[in-house]
Amino acid sequence: MKRFRILAAALLALCALGAAQARSLDTVRKDGRIVVATEGQFAPFNYFKGSTLTGFEVELAELVTQRMGLKTDWKTVGFDALLTGLQQDRWDLVIASHGVTPERAKAVTFTAPHYCSGGIVVSLDPAIRSAKDLAGKVVAVQTGTSYLESVQKIPGIQQMKNFPTDVDARSALLSHRVDAWVTDRFVAKEMIAKAPNAGMKLGDMVFVERIAAAVAKGNQALADAWSKALAQTMADGSYTALSQKYFGEDVRCH
Ligand code: ARG
């Protein structure tokens, strides 16, 4: 009986391991398809135009996976679920503007970065521009982001309000429920250009970060294949053309 119990426990442990086993590069290659997850609520990087998923990261991923000789199956889920889904082997790769942080690197394996950016202050009040100006203020950020992490460290913040999407955080600013919104510099630029009469003012950058795709922890061969194909798009002009189309500049890390 005891032996049976030990055996059952061992089997269960094996199953749990098996379930968390990420698909290797070989398996993905044999399948010919890679499952890529993103959020779809972070224009101009990943968003829905009507019912079509698009954006700089979506188009870039299509270029990169094509170079890898793969077809892409897209999944869109809440930002919070993206990295944990890698650990549960629900998809092969995540591309959703994740900054490479030591904390995240404990849980996932990052590829080479596909752009460099940072968090920026957006406010309706021109007097709120810098990190210092945020003292005593209420600041909106998206849950689970590096913005939250960095704003938390700014001394004297009155309150940080978390929102499930960055779009919700922006709405909170526009409806005067918060004093400032901290988001990606390119997201902010695009929003201000799209709604020039909304009164949003671009403040200073509060930190910089390298943005990369991620795979399950230790799935190094898949990460390397992605990084290699990404480097090819950066060398053959296709990355630059795409970046120009979205941002009017080349957003790669230097
Ligand atoms: N760059 C920030 C981070 O690393 C925000 C990413 C938000 N991405 C998104 N798809 N909403 O956390």
Image (tube, rainbow, N blue to C red):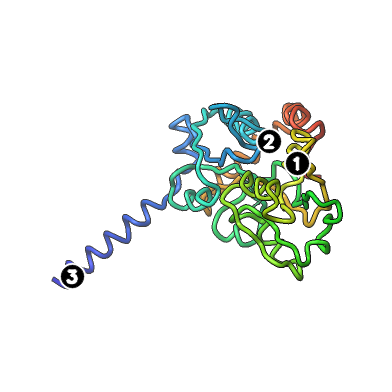
Q: Earlier in the sequence, mark 1 or mark 2?
A: 2
Residue placed farthest to the right in the image? 127
The residue drawn where x is 49% and y is 49% is 86
Q: Amino acid at mark 2?
A: Pro
Q: 148 or 72: nearer the eye? A: 148
| Name of the residue lying farthest toward the bottom | 2
Q: Disc 3 marks which amino acid?
A: Arg
Query: Which residue position is annotated with label 1?
Result: 186
Q: From this view, report whether residue 52 is shown above or below residue 1.
A: above
Rounded to the nearest angstrom, the CA distance separating label 2 from label 3 is: 58 Å
Q: Which residue is mark 3?
A: 3
Residue 230 appears left or right of 92 = right
The C terminus, quarter of image: top right
- Residue depth check, mark 3 versus mark 1: number of the one nearer the observer: 1
Distance of label 3 from label 1 (alpha carbons) = 60 Å
Q: Is residue 238 left or right of residue 93?
A: right
| Mark 2 or mark 3, whichever is nearer to me | 2
Residue 230 location (% of width, % of height): 67, 36
Image disc number at residue 44: 2
Farthest residue in the front direction? Answer: 176
- Residue 160 pos. (x, y %): 66, 62
Q: Secondary structure at mark 2?
A: loop
**CB contact under 8 Å: marks 1 and 2:** yes
